[in-house]
Amino acid sequence: MAQEVRGVIAPGRNEPVRVETIIVPDPGPGEAVVQIQACGVCHTDLHYKQGGINDEFPFLLGHEAAGVVESVGAGVTDVAPGDFVVLNWRAVCGQCRACLRGRPWYCFDTHNAKQRMTLTDGTELSPALGIGAFAEKTLVAAGQCTKVDPSVAPQVAGLLGCGVMAGIGAAINTGNVGRGDTVAVIGCGGVGDAAVAGASLAGAAKVIAVDIDDRKLETARSMGATHTVNSRSTDPVEAIRELTGGFGADVVIEAVGRPETYRQAFYARDLAGTVVLVGVPTPEMKLELPLLDVFGRGGSLKSSWYGDCLPSRDFPMLIDLHLQGRLDLGAFVTETIELTDVEKAFERMHDGDVLRSVVVL
Ligand SMILES: NC(=O)c1ccc[n+]([C@@H]2O[C@H](COP(=O)([O-])OP(=O)(O)OC[C@H]3O[C@@H](n4cnc5c(N)ncnc54)[C@H](O)[C@@H]3O)[C@@H](O)[C@H]2O)c1
Ligand SMILES: [Zn+2]
Ligand SMILES: [Zn+2]
């Protein structure tokens, strides 16, 4: 029987989000219904609400979640009712050209639920990143559920579902940060701070955090930044060069998603260094760079989709590091809130007051 639950929808471009009754169908073949226990508020949810991702309103927001599998459809063998899972937005298909080449972290044909969740009048909802977890329950493809150690708190586990995984992965997977590297991270929200923590875990010699907000720089220090630069008052390119013997950092991670911060990342890296873009730009943004500089500075310019993660490999590993006390995921949770507080959480995020607000159900 389809169920009625409460969920947070974004009805139209820049309209306030609100809690509505939504209909969650029973899981069909390959699908699962998950009872959500916690879901973090990510900047990408705000991008959806602003129409920055696409125009397929109404959206069912929320995609950084953990919960318990309630029921599964035919043919589902990897997860069962009662399993504690983190939801992912890359359910590796195993069949596409990326998967067949042995690069499943790029999977180009990731699965979502085939059935649609709806409003009570039948309007179909677009779940954010194929998840839609600011809801008491949601319907996903079973491959979007990754089992992890149930002894971890849901509000902490859920963070791996998006921002924290994206940031840590930007450093350790995409940027391939290694022991002794110098790393700079531009933008130290949830994603950037996770990149700081990832670089630190990987053994970087210097981790330079850059933000325009001193509060964010302070948290970045607690996550492992060795140096901080407020780019409102200091030229970050000059500062990063100065801190790296005049050369620039080996890896610069851009976690804002704007042309001006990308440009800073581009010029703040050493020759043959790596730029990782993990911030998500909006459609109207353009970047102009001298092509000779692109050539002459060498190295690699990479984008990081979801931290190039493999949920089945990376989520349990990071949860283990957390449980061993080696990765403080709890430090990302500024506040826990209710479903009705998501709009307010967007304002607080916009004002820079939080690293992560997490809806707890
Ligand atoms: N690539 C991915 O898979 C992925 C996954 C999740 C989120 N994201 C994206 O990552 C970005 C960051 O997300 P978040 O949740 O950390 O957002 P956030 O709002 O918490 O953090 C953004 C940070 O950037 C800082 N900032 C803003 N303008 C700046 C500037 N000009 N210079 C330096 N710092 C500046 C802010 O002070 C803030 O600390 C967003 O674009 C989001 O959509 C990407
Ligand atoms: Zn695939
Ligand atoms: Zn996200």
Image (spheres, rainbow, N blue to C red):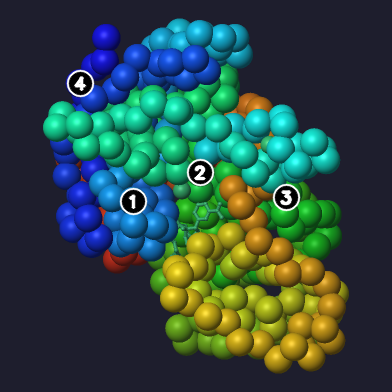
Q: Residue at x 60, y 13 (%)?
A: 78
Q: Earlier along the polypeptide chain: callout 2 or callout 1?
A: 1
Residue that numbered label 2 is attached to? 162
**Residue 229 percent coordinates (x, y):** 55, 76
Q: Amino acid at mark 3?
A: Ile
Q: Pointer 3 and pointer 1: residues touching (CB < 8 Å)?
A: no
Q: Earlier along the polypeptide chain: callout 3 or callout 1?
A: 1
Which mark, by number, is residue 172?
Answer: 3
Q: Is residue 228 above or below residue 26?
A: below
**Residue 312 percent coordinates (x, y):** 66, 28
Using the rendered image of the protein, determine whether residue 191 is visible from the camera's viewpoint.
Answer: yes
Which mark, by number, is residue 4?
Answer: 4
Q: Nearer the viewer, mark 3 or mark 1?
A: 1
Q: Quadrant of the N terminus?
A: top left
Question: Which of these two is toward me, 107 or 274?
Answer: 107
Residue that numbered label 1 is attached to? 56
Figure quadrant, ligand 2: top right
Label 3 to label 4, Cα distance in Å? 41 Å
Q: Amino acid at mark 4?
A: Glu
* CA neighbours of label 3 inside 10 A, class few (<14), some (14 to 19), many (20+): many
Q: Amino acid at mark 2?
A: Cys
Using the rendered image of the protein, determine whether residue 338 is visible from the camera's viewpoint.
Answer: no
Which mark, by number, is residue 239?
Answer: none
* CA neighbours of label 4 inside 10 A, class few (<14), some (14 to 19), many (20+): some
- Label 2 element class: loop
Q: Earlier along the polypeptide chain: callout 4 or callout 2?
A: 4
Q: Residue at x 56, y 9 (%)?
A: 75
Q: Earlier along the polypeptide chain: callout 1 or callout 4?
A: 4
Label 3 to label 1, Cα distance in Å? 33 Å
**Residue 262 percent coordinates (x, y):** 59, 76
- Label 1 element class: loop
Q: Residue at x 83, y 54 (%)?
A: 179
